[in-house]
Image (tube, rainbow, N blue to C red):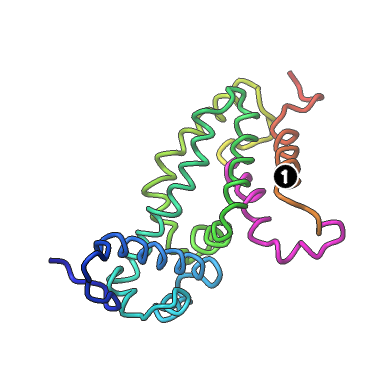
């Protein structure tokens, strides 16, 4: 019989099975960890801090996650990867026009990240950051397998003269990430700028899709 969590009281007649409460407690710990990792980074967040955020003891964190790698695997597989798959689903069901597809991808990324407060900060710290501890998981489990959904169609459209000739197709996704997640991760900086106080998700979507539309399109004066 599997061990019970350290704080789990003895089961009484009529009490739900331990597995149900275990799942809720485990999810609660993942949520606490991902919030702190987005705010402070993985390296700067201790097990004690995660326990305090969740309102439990450090022993309970160790009960569910034997080490830091186990916790990071859970965060990637159960929180980060589903969001990434949701965003990439836009490419599979999106419009055939390459510019419209990238604009739709940007909109979905902005709306997904806006609805998930920890997502932009975690991405900037643990994917983009030099010592990011989720980057290899992203590259090995998602990014390299999904790259063809973006890179191949863009390269083909570029070769056929459907995109701005000054673009480097391999850098389009890099630019898209910069236009979408970076503003959301740095709201605390630019929100105080003149005219920025009322910028909301819809405004950011319009701004980014306009930039992408003009930047990706073939300029009117481009040589045929």
Residue at figure coordinates x 36%, y 81% from the top left: 57
In the image, residue 107 sits, relative to residue 184, either above or below, namely: above
Residue at figure coordinates x 49%, y 35% from the top left: 89
Residue at figure coordinates x 53%, y 58% from the top left: 123
In the image, residue 147 sits, relative to residue 159, either above or below, namely: below
Q: Which residues are magenta?
A: 171-196
Where in the figure is residue 161, as x and y percent of width and height? 65, 22
The answer to which quarter of the image holds residue 5 is bottom left
Please say whether residue 146 is one of the residues in the magenta stretch. Answer: no
Q: Main secondary structure of the magenta part?
A: helix
Tag 1 residue: 202
Where in the figure is residue 170, as x and y percent of width and height? 55, 39
The answer to which quarter of the image holds residue 63 is bottom left
Is 186 left, or right, of 151 in this rendering?
right
Q: Is residue 98 or residue 3 the one in the foreground?
A: 3
Q: Which quarter of the rendered picture does the C terminus lie within?
A: top right
């Amino acid at each position: 019989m599997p061990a019970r969590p350290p704080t789990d009281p003895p089961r009484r007649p009529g009490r739900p099975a331990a597995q149900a409460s275990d799942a809720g407690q485990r999810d609660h710990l993942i949520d606490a960890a991902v919030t702190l990792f987005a705010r402070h980074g993985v390296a700067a967040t201790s097990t004690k801090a995660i326990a305090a955020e969740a309102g439990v003891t450090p022993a309970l964190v160790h009960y569910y996650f034997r080490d830091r790698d186990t916790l990071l695997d859970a965060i990637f597989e159960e929180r980060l990867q589903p969001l990434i798959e949701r965003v990439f689903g836009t490419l599979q069901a999106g419009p055939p026009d390459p510019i419209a597809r990238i604009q739709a991808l940007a909109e979905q990324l902005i709306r997904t990240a806006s609805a998930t407060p920890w997502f932009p900060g975690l991405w900037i710290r643990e994917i983009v950051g030099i010592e990011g501890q989720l980057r290899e998981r992203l590259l090995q489990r998602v990014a390299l397998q999904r790259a063809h959904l973006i890179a191949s169609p863009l390269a083909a459209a570029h070769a056929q003269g459907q995109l701005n000739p000054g673009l480097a197709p391999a850098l389009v996704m890099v630019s898209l990430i910069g236009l979408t997640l970076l503003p959301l991760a740095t709201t605390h900086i630019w929100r105080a700028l003149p005219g920025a106080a009322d910028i909301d998700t819809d405004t950011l979507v319009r701004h980014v899709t306009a930039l992408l539309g003009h930047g990706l399109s073939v300029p009117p004066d481009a040589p045929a």
